[in-house]
Image (spheres, rainbow, N blue to C red):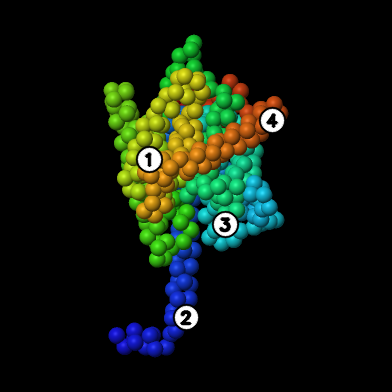
């Protein structure tokens, strides 16, 4: 008690408030750094998911692509990406403040998001894409495609943020942009050999579903930093807000996994592991935009629907559209990214006030969310098509039939993931 009385007698309220503000600022910086480290760890999760869900003869190639994404993304986003996303603007569409902008925890945290957007494309086109081509596209994605459109909302003066668009952590800004780019890439690269034969869709099973499962657990963990860190602060109301974001993220992921599990159990007759894994990821994507504007019940329902939706989307894209997405990236990140954005306009909240069509908020927010989702999809599809089409006509997108059958590990990298005597074709 003497100490408290001493503080009261010697420290003015203004000094005390400044001290608390400084402590909260330091805690906020620490929270962003720790969250950025968690998001960095998601690259390991993507590596395991993508390699586990595809053939063993391409595991090294997938590891190299994910390693490339973090290396290229870290440098290009530092050099130009941050400025294109958070620089000055006069029109709300394009941003710039010069080279080498950003610093400290903020730059580090935002860089991890850029790398995530690029690596989404990797899994969809696994097993048949030139490594050199992927390098170029990854560079352009992290330096241009992702940063410019990200600024529309997150810079604070972008045209979408001025309309009241909400995307707390990136269902559209990160995941939808990456997912629709993956769709364009999968179409232009074409299917893997043996995927579609005489009009029939043949399964090409992944070589290690346990690795894929471990990868999903890592992504799930990393997502707590992905969404929670997007609070961008800690202390007082921000600490409560970030904690709720993490809780809501977990609820949505759990509901998404169960949604896919139950759907496949009814549809296939047995619960399907790969689809359930994608269901959990879909639950995470479903809440990424609305994790700051959703109740616990609303988050669980959004994730549940996302987990069901992703199963139908994967089946439709593969069996009806005849597009070969090796890991379901288009459905998980593109299709469900749109759902996660739009659902805010259905039952999102602002504090205790409903802002959605179904909870008394009217149709205004739903319209803005739909417009934003469409804008990010269109931007990603158009730019990705232009870039990949040029690459296809110049250096080519796809490896030869002989290289694909041998495996990209040996042909592209001169090594294999699993030494020893075994059949490399499976």
Q: Which residue is mark 1?
A: 358
**248 or 81, nearer to the observer:** 248
**416 or 213, nearer to the observer:** 213
State the separation of the CA atoms marked 3 and 4.
31 Å
Q: Which residue is mark 2?
A: 15
Q: Is residue 130 left or right of residue 32?
A: right
Residue 216 percent location from the top left of the image: 39, 41
Q: Closer to us: mark 2 or mark 3? A: 2
**350 or 99, nearer to the observer:** 350
Tag 1 near tag 3, CB within 8 Å: no
Mark 4: which secondary structure? helix
Q: Closer to us: mark 1 or mark 3? A: 1
Tag 2 near tag 1, CB within 8 Å: no
Between disc 2 and disc 1, whose residue precedes? 2
Tag 4 near tag 1, CB within 8 Å: no
Q: What is the quadrant of residue 385 in the picture? A: top right
Residue shown at 55% from the left, 47% from the top: 163
Disc 3 packing (10 Å; few <14; some 14–19; many ≥20): some
Mark 1: which secondary structure? helix
Q: Is residue 27 left or right of residue 402?
A: left
Q: Closer to us: mark 2 or mark 1? A: 1
Q: Which residue is mark 4?
A: 390
């Amino acid at each position: 008690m003497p100490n408290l009385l001493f503080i009261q007698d010697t420290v003015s309220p203004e000094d005390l408030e400044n001290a608390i503000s400084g402590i909260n600022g330091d805690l906020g910086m620490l929270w962003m750094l720790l969250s950025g480290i968690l998001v960095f760890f998601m690259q390991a999760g993507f590596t395991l998911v993508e390699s586990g869900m595809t053939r063993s003869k391409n595991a090294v190639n997938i590891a190299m692509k994910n390693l490339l994404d973090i290396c290229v993304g870290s440098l290009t986003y530092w050099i130009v990406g941050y400025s294109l996303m958070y620089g000055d603007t006069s029109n709300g569409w394009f941003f710039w403040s010069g080279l080498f902008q950003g610093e400290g925890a903020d730059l580090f945290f935002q860089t991890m998001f850029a790398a995530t957007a690029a690596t989404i494309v990797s899994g969809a086109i696994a097993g048949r894409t030139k490594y050199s081509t992927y390098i170029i596209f990854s560079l352009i994605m992290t330096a241009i495609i992702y940063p410019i459109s990200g600024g529309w909302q997150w810079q604070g003066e972008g045209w979408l943020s001025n309309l009241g668009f909400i995307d707390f952590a990136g269902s559209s800004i990160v995941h939808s942009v990456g997912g629709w780019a993956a769709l364009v890439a999968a179409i232009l690269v074409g299917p893997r050999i043996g995927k579609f034969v005489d009009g029939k869709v043949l399964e090409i099973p992944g070589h290690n579903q346990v690795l894929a499962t471990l990868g999903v657990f890592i992504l799930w963990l990393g997502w707590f930093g992905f969404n929670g860190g997007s609070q961008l602060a800690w202390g007082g109301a921000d600490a409560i807000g970030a904690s709720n974001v993490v809780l809501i993220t977990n609820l949505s992921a759990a509901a998404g996994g169960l949604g896919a599990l139950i759907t496949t159990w009814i549809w296939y007759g047995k619960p399907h592991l790969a689809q359930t894994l994608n269901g959990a990821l879909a639950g995470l994507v479903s809440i990424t935009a609305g994790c700051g504007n959703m109740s616990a019940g609303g988050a669980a329902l959004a994730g549940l629907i996302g987990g069901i939706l992703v199963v139908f989307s994967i089946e439709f894209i593969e069996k009806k559209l005849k597009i070969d997405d090796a890991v379901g990236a288009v459905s998980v990140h593109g299709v469900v990214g749109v759902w996660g954005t739009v659902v805010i306009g259905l039952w999102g909240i602002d504090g205790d006030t409903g802002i959605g069509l179904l909870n008394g908020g009217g149709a205004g927010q739903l319209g803005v969310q739909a417009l934003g989702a469409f804008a990010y999809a269109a931007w990603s599809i158009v730019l990705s098509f232009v870039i990949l089409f040029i690459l296809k006509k110049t250096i080519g997108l796809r490896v030869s039939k002989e290289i694909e059958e041998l495996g990209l590990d040996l042909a592209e990298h001169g090594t294999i993931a699993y030494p020893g005597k075994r059949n490399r074709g499976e």
